[in-house]
Amino acid sequence: MTKKNFNEKQANSLHNVQQQNADGQVNNQVVNSGEIVNNIVDEAVKQPSNDELQREQRRRELAALRISSCTVVEPEVPTLTVDGVGLFALSDIHALKGKQKCGKTTALKVCLAAWLKGQQFRVASGLKEPRVLYLDTEQKETDVKKIIEDVKKMTGLSNEYIDGHLMLIPLRRRDQDQLLVDLHQLVDDYHPQVVVIDGIVEFVASFNDEALAKQLIHDLLVLSEERRLALVCVLHTNKADEDHNMRGHLGTMLAQKAGTVLECRKQDCVITVTCTDARHQEMPQWSIMFGDDGTIVDADEQRRLALEQHRISIQERRKEAQAERQQERLDYALMVIRNHGGCIKRSELTDILIKKFELERSTVSRFIKKQIEAKALYEASGMIYACNETTLPF
């Protein structure tokens, strides 16, 4: 009922009361009651609706998010550095990707050693004795236990120190719909500064479900900001050798939101970690391998030597290919000379070689000049002859 209708009804009621009053005077109690009702109606009309209340709440929330020139924000704190370049910052999510069995967990062992000890090889901790929560959703308990064993070999730290700074939880027997709740519970109980999820794909029913992927990455991002922790997610790349993108919609969303994306590649026995995406400066690459005693060792020098050997091999193959092309052209030139009775005009030979091998005139001219210098061909009065010995220069 509108205020107008309500007032009209109230006036009619008062008029009837007045008519029924034999003395012709209005009952004061009824008048006062009418005024009270009017006041209640006025207040009710002035009250904001639920939609208005929700819009006002949204305005306050958005206003609180605004960054202005006077806003003070906490500086980014990397949890690790390589040669002074920071990575895996607090209050953010990050990614480590790679093909199956390419050394991702091995690289994470080096990161764990750096967090716990302060530095391992060229990887250094940006935090002082951080608490690390490591969740493994793929490996069995014996392999998960080996993570601690390898970290202990690299660092020489005591069991007591490692257990006081590293909480290692195998979760591959947990149901998929429990994992996110488990993560929140462990973060609440352990208060880590770094969380590693080795096998983030297990947190969703399908890594190709766009809605599930968006929601999971959003939940992880909120958790990392609210609890000021670095959350590192490990995910496989697509199976094709040339495809280095992380799998499915989950990989797409993770790549979009991650502050740092590292990739592991394995060549022979050397595992190399590179930075494929970073919001700021990209981390320099570093390499590791297993030594003769099974301990993880620095492999930067081995990597450098392997790259140098690869470069030399490529140069040698190019030289061999070039020599084969030159020999093919010389053999054809000699055949042409023989077919022309033992000599041919240089200009005519040039035209024949251009057409045969689809080369530029300048390239053929240089070829003939080199063969003359090498005594494979002989020139006299503009005519080209074949020498008795046709050796190809290298």
Image (spheres, rainbow, N blue to C red):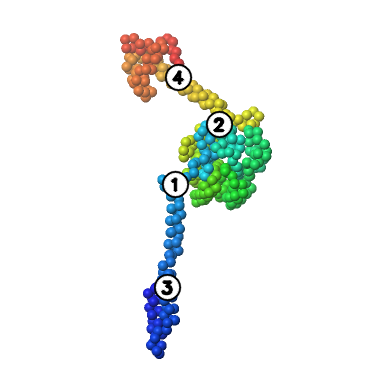
The residue drawn where x is 48% and y is 22% is: 315
Q: What element carries label 1?
A: loop
Q: Where is residue 150 in the image (x, y as percent from the top left)?
A: 64, 35
- In the rendered structure, which amino acid carries the disc numbered 2? Arg
Q: In this view, does 201 lie to the left or right of 52?
A: right
Compare marks 2 and 3 and give the one earlier in the sequence.
Answer: 3
- In the rendered structure, which amino acid carries the disc numbered 4? Ala
Residue 311 seen by the camera:
yes
Q: Position of residue 72 (x, y in %)?
A: 46, 45
Q: Which of 309 and 84 is in front in this view?
A: 84
- In the rendered structure, which amino acid carries the disc numbered 3? Asn
Gap in angstroms between the C-alphas marked 4 and 1:
67 Å
Compare marks 3 and 4 and give the one earlier in the sequence.
Answer: 3
Instruction: Report the disc number at residue 71.
Output: 1
Where is 359 relative to 15, above or below? above
Q: Closer to the observer: label 1 or label 2?
A: 1
The number of discs equals 4
Compare marks 1 and 3 and give the one earlier in the sequence.
Answer: 3
Instruction: Report the disc number at residue 39.
Output: 3
- In the rendered structure, which amino acid carries the disc numbered 1? Thr
Gap in angstroms between the C-alphas marked 1 and 2:
36 Å
Instruction: Report the disc number at residue 203.
Output: none
Q: Nearer the viewer, residue 251 or 37?
A: 37
Q: Are marks 1 and 3 in contact (CB under 8 Å)?
A: no
Gap in angstroms between the C-alphas marked 3 and 4:
104 Å
Gap in angstroms between the C-alphas marked 4 and 2:
43 Å
Name the residue carrying label 2. Answer: 122
The residue drawn where x is 37% and y is 17% is: 366
Crowding around mark 4 (Cα neighbors within 10 Å: few <14, some 14 to 19, many 20+) is some
Instruction: Report the disc number at residue 323.
Output: 4
